[in-house]
Image (cartoon, rainbow, N blue to C red):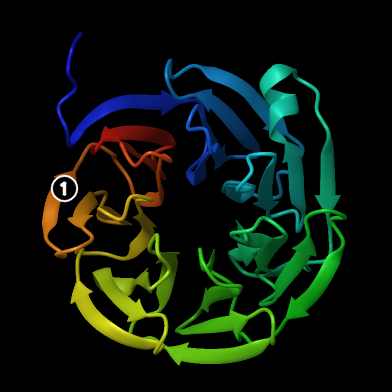
């Protein structure tokens, strides 16, 4: 059996016609879900073959109409956000087995303005009971994942929502917009606002929920201690804007992706740079580790998804 060397590219997935704006893995690690153009694509991670293309979001402009995608912790649902102001819910198992499947459409976001239109980010809570969506309309909506009814609307940001991340251990949500971040404690609806030195474009929690990281303009990276809500590390990690950050579930790695077309893999314990991955011909828009932390997937403005062996 051929041994695949670590820190090498092991595959390229082609099929999207516009930038890849989101990537997620099914919890069993067998399926990769990607968002781009006005579609969501399901890929077999072992063979690299396309299983299914999901359509339903309206294509409102020349950029990718599907802006974001996430998978529920139990693997039952895919949620996608689009420039058509909707969140679409797809029953994953249905679409793995057939071209037809059960769907839901969630509405309530307004259009927003300029380039930041529609729903910009979606995320499931760790227990899977809440879906959060953030829009160009500067608000965050929380949805009940049993009834798909809106629970509440969180307001207070002055700019379009750029990214969302739930704590893996607490009922808390981080949102970024403009140069601010907000921590929302969902049990009490307490709202804590942070001001970042460089506008954060991406946010991600580490596996134990003790820290979260943000990446932003001019390659700025910050690591924040969740309990004390303070910035503990501030570095410049790329030559251009950091658009994507991901932590591995085993706690060993984190990765950053940038407009400089590179992906950097870091030791999450020591902070040392492990490797720099090159190959994409345009900006990196999204990163995700597979559930067992062995593979990192990257989505780019070059319309491709690349797979990298990391463990």
User: Which quadrant of the rendered structure holds the N terminus?
Assistant: top left
Mark 1 lies on a secondary structure that is strand
User: Which quadrant of the rendered structure holds the C terminus?
Assistant: top left
Res 198 seen here: yes
* Image coordinates for residue 265, horizontal then vertical, percent: 21, 51
Q: Is residue 243 left or right of residue 176?
A: left
Res 240 → quadrant:
bottom left
What is the residue that sits farthest to the top in this orientation? 1
Q: Is residue 254 left or right of residue 31?
A: left
Q: Is residue 60 left or right of residue 266?
A: right
Say how many tags the image has: 1
Above or below 246: residue 226:
below
The residue where tag 1 is placed is 276
* Image coordinates for residue 185, horizontal then vertical, percent: 62, 82
Towards the viewer: 170 or 50: 170
Res 109 → quadrant:
bottom right
* Image coordinates for residue 21, horizontal then vertical, percent: 51, 48
Above or below 81: residue 236:
below
Residue depicted at 70% across the width and 42% down the height: 77
Towards the viewer: 300 or 288: 288
Residue depicted at 17% across the width and 37% down the height: 7
* Image coordinates for residue 305, horizontal then vertical, percent: 40, 34
Q: Is residue 162 left or right of residue 112?
A: left
Res 147 → quadrant:
bottom right
Res 163 seen here: no
Q: Mark 1: few, some, or many residues within 10 Å (few <14, many ≥20)?
A: some
């Amino acid at each position: 059996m051929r041994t695949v060397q670590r820190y090498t590219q092991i595959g390229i997935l082609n099929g999207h016609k516009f930038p890849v704006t989101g990537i997620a893995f099914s919890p069993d690690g067998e399926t990769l879900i990607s968002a781009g153009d006005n579609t969501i694509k399901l890929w077999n991670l072992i063979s690299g073959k396309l299983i299914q293309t999901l359509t339903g979001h309206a294509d409102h402009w020349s950029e990718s109409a599907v802006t974001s995608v996430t998978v529920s912790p139990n693997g039952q649902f895919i949620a996608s956000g689009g420039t058509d102001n909707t969140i679409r819910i797809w029953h994953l198992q249905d679409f793995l087995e057939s071209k037809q499947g059960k769907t839901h459409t969630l509405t309530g976001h307004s259009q927003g303005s300029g380039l930041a239109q529609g729903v910009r980010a979606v995320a499931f809570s760790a227990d899977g009971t809440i879906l959060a969506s953030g829009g160009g309309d500067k608000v965050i909506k929380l949805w009940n994942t049993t009834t798909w009814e809106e629970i509440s609307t969180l307001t207070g940001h002055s700019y379009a929502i750029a990214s969302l991340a739930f704590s893996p251990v607490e009922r808390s949500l981080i949102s970024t917009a403009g140069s601010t971040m907000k921590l929302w404690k969902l049990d009490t609806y307490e709202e804590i606002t942070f001001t970042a030195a460089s506008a954060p474009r991406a946010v991600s929690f580490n596996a134990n929920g003790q820290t979260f990281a943000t990446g932003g303009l001019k390659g700025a990276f910050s690591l924040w201690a969740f309990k004390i809500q303070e910035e503990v590390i501030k570095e410049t990690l790329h030559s251009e804007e950091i658009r994507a950050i991901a932590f591995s579930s085993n706690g060993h790695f984190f990765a950053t992706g940038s407009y400089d077309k590179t992906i950097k893999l870091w030791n999450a314990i020591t902070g040392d740079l492990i490797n720099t991955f090159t190959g994409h011909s345009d900006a990196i828009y999204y990163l995700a580790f597979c559930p067992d932390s062995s593979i990192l997937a990257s989505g780019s403005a070059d319309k491709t998804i690349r797979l990298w062996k990391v463990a």
